[in-house]
Image (cartoon, rainbow, N blue to C red):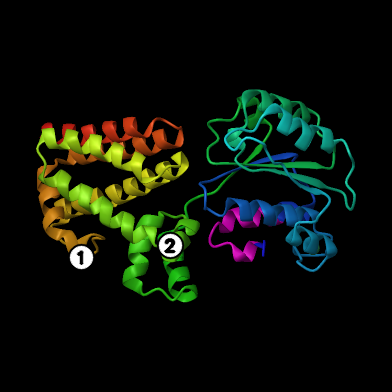
Amino acid sequence: MADFDAIIGQEQLKERMKATAESGQCSHAYLLVGERRSGRTMLAKAFAKAILCEGEGRKPCNCCLSCLQVEEGSHPDLVYVTHEKPNSIGVDDIRQGVNEDIILKPYRGTKKVYIVEEAEKMTAQAQNALLKTMEEPPSYAVILLIATTADAMLQTILSRSVLLPIHPVPDEIIRRYLMTEKHIPDYRADVICAFARGNVGRAIDIISGESFEQNKTEAVAILKSLSDADYGKIYQDSVKLGKVIKEKKENNEENRSYLSDLLDFFLVWFRDALVYKSTGRSEGLIFREEIQYIKKVSGDISYEGFEDIFRAIEKAKKMIRSNVNIETVSDLLLMSFKDCRKER
Ligand SMILES: [Zn+2]
């Protein structure tokens, strides 16, 4: 059910949304910024439900007709803006989904809510079309934009939206949730938290999917071969990695998410090595079963080298998000691993 209580973490954001809905003093546009699987869609839906709720007191009440209609997807004043092309929201989508509809008064209550998911996919023309509505919105209109990043939004849209950032959920909260609600043992909850990095949806994906263990094995194989490799071999690996990824999944989107998963393993692997380098202890390491490799990597790479690696991985993740060719990403990444070792 779309209720604030069903969302793990995000306490401040939830309180802010509740208070806004209960006061009845909504802004006309909100920009909810958070990663995929971070609970952003659920938060937007709970917020919309609270705004539209006709009950008294705490909102959403989950009892009134409005709340029930939001839950079953039949509320006449809650509009999910859809788009025809999977990778872009065009000007016609916004015209039909928002601009032409928003002039019609609400059927039931005093508000009408529009949810635009993946708002970063709006073209500049689409954003400009939306801006026209945002400049002079009807008094009842509330537009909830959901985006992975605010970077792709026009400044004029940003200046007219209230920013609602979704922050990573602390490991301790995810860990407690995994142990009490999902009955995961503590040692495994630690590993899952390390990879979920504050994203509850990702933690749930990890425990419910098979790909996590498989991807982990593949990532470790690549990392082990890197730790043994000479520079020529690293180059071959980079070519191989790009090729493997391409052959592995026909679908480009899946390729990206696969490479992104590998990068998460890389990040934790090097973080383990850095922890080992500075403490000389293997307790608490996520990859402690690979301690002989972790030791070797920690000796091979300088502190500056580690910084370079973390920067390179973050950069690669950014490139994946901005649709840079996957082979280019894996080439640049592995070459930067090579460079950091050369600088020693
Ligand atoms: Zn209600």
Residue 7, magenta (yes or no): yes
Residue 274 in view (yes/no): no
- The answer to whether 1 is drawn above or below residue 28 in the figure is below
- Report the amino acid beneath label 1: Glu
Q: Residue 142: x percent and y percent? A: 76, 42
Q: Which residues are magenta?
A: 4-18
Badge number at residue 153: none
Residue on which the image places disc 1? 283
In the image, what residue type sits under mark 2?
A: Gly
Query: Residue 97 location, x and y as percent?
Result: 76, 37
- Which of the four quarters of the rendered structure image does ligand 1 lie in? bottom right
Label 1 CA crowd tier, 10 Å (few <14, some 14–19, many 20+): few
Asked if residue 342 is among those painted magenta in the image, a careful observer would answer no
Query: Mark 2 near ligand 1 (CB under 8 Å)?
Result: no
Element at label 2 = loop
User: Earlier along the polypeptide chain: callout 1 or callout 2?
Assistant: 2
Locate residue 202 relative to residue 222 in the image: left or right: right
Q: Looking at this view, is 94 or 326 the one in front?
A: 326
Eye-nearest disc, 1 or 2:
2
Residue that badge 2 annotates? 209
